[in-house]
Each structure stands twice: as C-alpha cells, then as structure tokens.
Amino acid sequence: MIGVSVLGYGNIGSGVAQILRENADCIKKSAGEDVTVLHVCDLREFPGDPCEAILTHDASEAIHDPAVQIVVETMGGVHPAYEFVKDALTSGRHVATSNKELVAACGTELIALAKEKHVNFFFEASVGGGIPIIRPLTSSIVSDHVRRIEGILNGTTNYMLFRMQESSLSFEAALKEAQDLGFAERNPAADIEGADACRKIAILCSLAFGQPLAYTRVPTEGITGVTPEDFVYAEKMGCTVKLLATGRQTEDGVSVRVAPVLLPLSHPLAGIRGVTNAVLVEGDMCGTLTFTGAGAGKLPTASAVCADIVEAVRHPQTTVIRGWEGEELPLADAGEETHSFFVRLADIVEMSAFAEYAEQVFAGVIEGEAACVTAPLTEEAFAALCKEAPVISYLRVA
Amino acid sequence: MIGVSVLGYGNIGSGVAQILRENADCIKKSAGEDVTVLHVCDLREFPGDPCEAILTHDASEAIHDPAVQIVVETMGGVHPAYEFVKDALTSGRHVATSNKELVAACGTELIALAKEKHVNFFFEASVGGGIPIIRPLTSSIVSDHVRRIEGILNGTTNYMLFRMQESSLSFEAALKEAQDLGFAERNPAADIEGADACRKIAILCSLAFGQPLAYTRVPTEGITGVTPEDFVYAEKMGCTVKLLATGRQTEDGVSVRVAPVLLPLSHPLAGIRGVTNAVLVEGDMCGTLTFTGAGAGKLPTASAVCADIVEAVRHPQTTVIRGWEGEELPLADAGEETHSFFVRLADIVEMSAFAEYAEQVFAGVIEGEAACVTAPLTEEAFAALCKEAPVISYLRVA
C-alpha cells in the first residue's frame, strides 16, 4: 500500500482524494499497488466530508508519517507550499503538485533537490490542467530539438476573447459573464493581466529548451486592452484574437512572450474555443504536435495529479524529469524580435509615420479611425514609430 | 554506451539511424547515455549510405551481438518481423517497433513475453506516426476509466476526403493525386479499405480499455463508397465526411468500428486537414483530450521510435506498458449499435420505407434522387430497412 498526504483540500485537493477513492480500481491496475490518502492537511474544517477523519491542521504530521511515500501539494501560492514541498522532498518523499506559482518560482531548486534525494518531483497539473503536456515533453518529445512551444494556457481569458468575438461583448461584459459562470476569479488580475500564462510558459520553456527560465524574464501583456473593435478588424483579416504564450528557438537565443495576438484562422490554435487550453510543440524531427483539453476544472486537474502519483509509484527510484537545470536559458533580445503589427490610429492622416511600412490599410471600418498592418518590424522600431503617431491600440500578428 | 540494431532500413528505419546520428546530443541528454546504431539489417544493399559499414543481411547477427541492448524493428508486415522481435525479447533485449501489423496481430503475446523477460516492448510509432499517444495512454491517462477513444488514424484517406471536399474531386482523382504526391501507395487497398485504421484502433482500444482486442473483430468499412455528392449533402448538414475509427465503452461492452461518418463541424476532429492524424480520448475524470500531429512521414515516425529507445534506456527494468492482458475485450453486439443514418435513395417515392424514421429530408439537392437522415436506429433495424428500398449509399452520422 502506498500512503499519500494531500496538502490543501480545496477544489483540486478534494478532487485528488475523490479520484483516488472512486477510481481506486484503475489506479491499482496502473500503479500495481493500492494508493490510499492517509492525511489531508488544511487550515479549514470539513464537517461531514469523507476526509473528516483524516484531516489535520499540522502539515508536518501529514508529511512525516512513516507510512506516507507521496505528498500531494494543492495549496497554491509560493508560501508555505515551498517549505512543505522542500520538507517532503528532503525527507525522501515524492511530491506531485498542481501549483504553477511554486513550480515557476522554485522549480529549478526543487527539481535539483528531488534528484539529490532520488525521488520524483512531478507537476503535470501545473500547466494545461488535465492535458498531458509535461510528461509528453519529458518522456515523448525527447529525441527532438524543440523549435517552438506555444499555447493558449489560460482558460479564463480564452473564454472572454471567445465571447467578445462571438457576441461582440465588451471586455467588461465578457469578464462579468466569466465571473458569473465561475470561469474567472473575483479578483481576475492574474488571468487578465497575463501573469498566469506567463508562469505556465516559463515552466514549458524550462522543460522544452532544457534550461531554467525565470518567469520574471517573460515580457507579458494581458488582454485588458483588447476591444470588440479588434475583432471587427480581425474578421476582415481572416484572423482571431488569442492570448498566446510563446517560446521560439532563434539563432540568438529563445524568444519568449505572452501577449494578445492576431492569429490566422489556419493556425492550429485558432479554433480553440471557450475555456479549452491547447499547447503546440514543434520539434525538428516530430513536426508540429498539438495537445488540447480542459485547462482547468476540479477533476481534469486532479486527474493529472493522480497520474503523477501513479508514475511516482511505478518509477520510485528514477527522477523522470530531465533537463531544466544549469544556467538560466539564454534569451534573444526582446527589442530585436520581429513581428508584423496591427495598429489602430486616430485618423488616416496620422498614418504618415507608418506609411512606409503599411502592407494593408483599413479606412472607414470603424468610424473616425484608420488602421494598418505593418511589414515585419522589430519591437524597438515599432515602439519608436508609436511615439510619432496617436496610436489607439496595437496587436502583434502571429 | 547503449547499442542498437535496426531491422529494416526503409523509410522509417533510415530515419531512426538519421535521428540517432543528427540528434545525438539531445538523445544523450534525455537518455543519460550515448545511443549508437551498431547494426543495420536489410536484404538490400545501400552503397554510399552512412549505414554501409554496419549493414548485415543476417538478422540473428544483428540481434545477438552482446553489445546490442535495444532492437528496432521497422520492417513492416507480420513475418518475419514477429520471429525477429520474439528472438530479441527472448534474449533479453528491448524492442521498439513502428509495425502496426505486428502489434495488432501479436501484441498480446509480445507484451506478455516482454513482461516475463523484464524488458520493454514499445510501439509508439505504430499508431499516429509522430503523435505521442501510446505513452500518454500508458503513462498519463492512468487514473481514468476511458469512456471513448476515436481517431483519424489514416493520413492517406484523410487527405483524399479533404481534397474531395475542398475541390469536389472524384474518389479516383483524389486517389491519383494522393499517389502522385507520395501520400498513397501504388496499391492503396490497406488505406482506402480501412485495414490500416482497423489495426490502429485495435491497438488503441487494447491499451485504453486494458484488454486485448483482435483487429479481426473490428467492423471495418473503407472510403471507396464515398462520393463528391456526399460532401454536397454534408455541407447542407453542417458536417464533413471523415474516416473515423472509434471505440466506446457502453453498458454492454465496448462498441468499436471503422467507417466513414458524417462529422458535425463542431466535433474536435472535424477540422483535421490533409495527412494530419488526431486521436481523441475521453476519460471519466480528465474529460476530452485530443492529440494532433503528423500521422506518417519518415522523421516524425522515426522520432517516435527514438523516444521509445530513450524510454527503454531510462527504464531498463520496468515494463512500462500496463494493461493489454487477459481475456479478449468484451464487445457490445455490433447489430445493436445505434446511430442516425444518412441515406441516399433513387427517388423520393422510394423513401416510404424510411418515412417513419426520417428526421430530415433532402429533395432536389442532387437531381434524380432524394436523401434523408434517420432518427437513431440500430444497425440491424437499418439493415432491414435497406432491403426494402433502393439505397444508393449511406453514411453513419457521428
């Protein structure tokens, strides 16, 4: 019998306990052993819940029970999750976590600690909810140089953009609808300002390119500036607007960014609707792969945590995560990154600064303004042009 | 150093040698060891090829070299691949194969043999080319009961159907185009008659549902009866036509089939274009996942074989494949399977047999015929109705 302690009995933690209980048959078949939750640690009380008899408020007690081999961390946030996970790994226990803040902030250290202790530190659920993407990156796409990894990694913003397009909702109306449906938090800042996607692409890049990428180095823009007018232009261009998180290998290092972009409808991620997430991986041998599924939600995310538990049981002596070690990933100069830009301007007369670079011009689509799509420009060159003209808004074209 | 022998130096086998050579750096990083091809076995000669110095015509010599720990089988066909693979496993060597005929015909026996010998028998490349689907099924979707697995598993037919839709090509013209582009074999029977997809869905079901499914038990129809007219109706119905391979868990067992179907455009697999393959897996916890990528091609397929090699090096004592053992998978009675059917009839007057069941009727769409979509009917009931009317053709509606 394999003993598990669950730290944090919220949405995902209670889902893990539920799956280990309800799907005990297939977990035993996959893992080769019974897997049982021995302790649940949370500061709250859960009267009447199945966990009531095994609930503790003392994380140390839950971690250090000699019968516990695997610690599940589903608390969220960096502290005290970090201290608990470190304690678990140091004491020779495997850890499976769904906590993207923790993995993005401390992954390098915790992976190294797990290697030193010959235990597993798994985090499939930290990116893409129920979508298998961490394990494919570490166990399947292992004979390729990854050229590009990009994804729609935040379901809240994808739902909002989808609704702004589908029903011409304003940003505010789309946010309120997402909140009413439980797809957005009361405080939506981490989603709409891109911080959530930023942490996830940092995790993916650290694995795909094999060296740590601190999330603080990822240029990040959210969707707060996206308007229904952008979708009017997008339709004319055969595009949609998505919050895209991207890492690309270039000759000068990896180019990484989180930003709303105009995505041609032919792009494999253009059709990802609602709260669905998707990750695209392009390797030099395997070509372009996409992985699509539920990016959040109690049971899909908990299912990914449980898969990590099964893997830890099956490979107790092997640290399955490789790469993500050594020096920080060399990044290309963000200012030298090249894109076509879509720019809205207060008047067509004001377009003179962009005239030389405009490849497509829109006049009269929205009354009282003009817009254009530029030839590929560096970020720096584009920023310089923006200083010379009354730019209403802009989007990169993917 | 890990020694590899490659049996069969065709498209995929030479791709494996190429990747092990050209991507030796990332393979060493992933596997933790150098991986080197020591022998290539093929009946042909390859003067001037990098393999020339290590070419042998004697499989036994290639398998039994004491320095060889992993045998790659990329010959195709059941014999003599079966004998060579059995020899390799029996002598304690891991095997990685791309050979769907072999895995579909002998998988149960070879997996059991690998378990007995404590070696790995891997076949990621046998389904979906470069798409990671075997390993996600065995290492990621392991805490779920799989409810459904379905896929577009044959790139040749998907390309042909795509071209029939896009450019109203006849079946014959689409086949010729696919042959000219190298997407279809000179003898295309295995693709267009569904035998290739049949073997692949049998492999996927054996893993997803945990018990062996003999491919001979899968009711299989190819695309030879699909016509440009079907696409005219499909468009009116908001559908496309795809060769779909499906396994679904029902109360009466697994319901499995390969057939061309009308797929609503909202279906996750409806947008899979050209030679791309995709697999959808629905679990009771993880929800609906899709995996998309190159379903064939030298390097994508070889990349999957190389990933199997890396996994074999990393987990030498573990047989990573679980499930696919025991009794044959219980199947639901195919005659009791229920679908809506789309039926074309020689005349609207002839529709009387179907009148009671028709939910949607098309008259005059194609001159001189009528068509309808039925309410859900069992296969048996539909077959009985077909005897009473001059049916031109039919398709199931997914």
Image (cartoon, coloured by chain):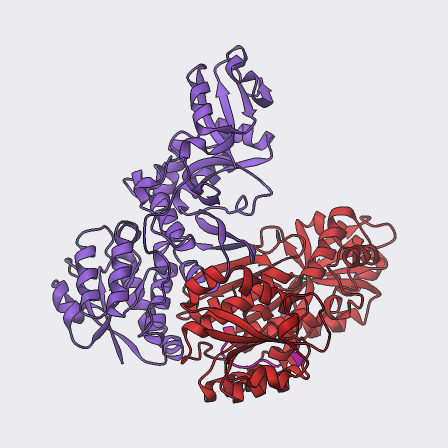
Chain colours: A purple, B red
**Observer-nearest of A259 and A110:** A110
Q: Position of residue B177 (x, y in %)?
A: 79, 54
Q: What residue sits 32% from the left and 75% below the top?
A: A313
- The magenta region covers B208-216
**Can residue A289 be seen by looking at this rendering?**
yes
- Give the quadrant of the N terminus of chain A: bottom left
**Observer-nearest of A137 and A34:** A137
Q: Position of residue B70 (x, y in %)?
A: 52, 77
Instruction: From the image, give the main secondary structure of the stretch colored magenta.
Output: loop
**Can residue A141 be seen by looking at this rendering?**
no
Tell me the quarter of the picture where residue A63 sits: bottom left
Tell me the quarter of the picture where residue B212 sits: bottom right
Q: What residue sits 74% from the left and 50% below the top?
A: B165
Tell me the quarter of the picture where residue B372 sits: bottom right
Q: Position of residue A78 (x, y in %)?
A: 22, 51
Q: Is residue A94 left or right of residue A130?
A: left
Q: What residue sits 40% from the left and 33% below the top?
A: A173
Is residue B20 depicted above or below B319 in this figure?
above
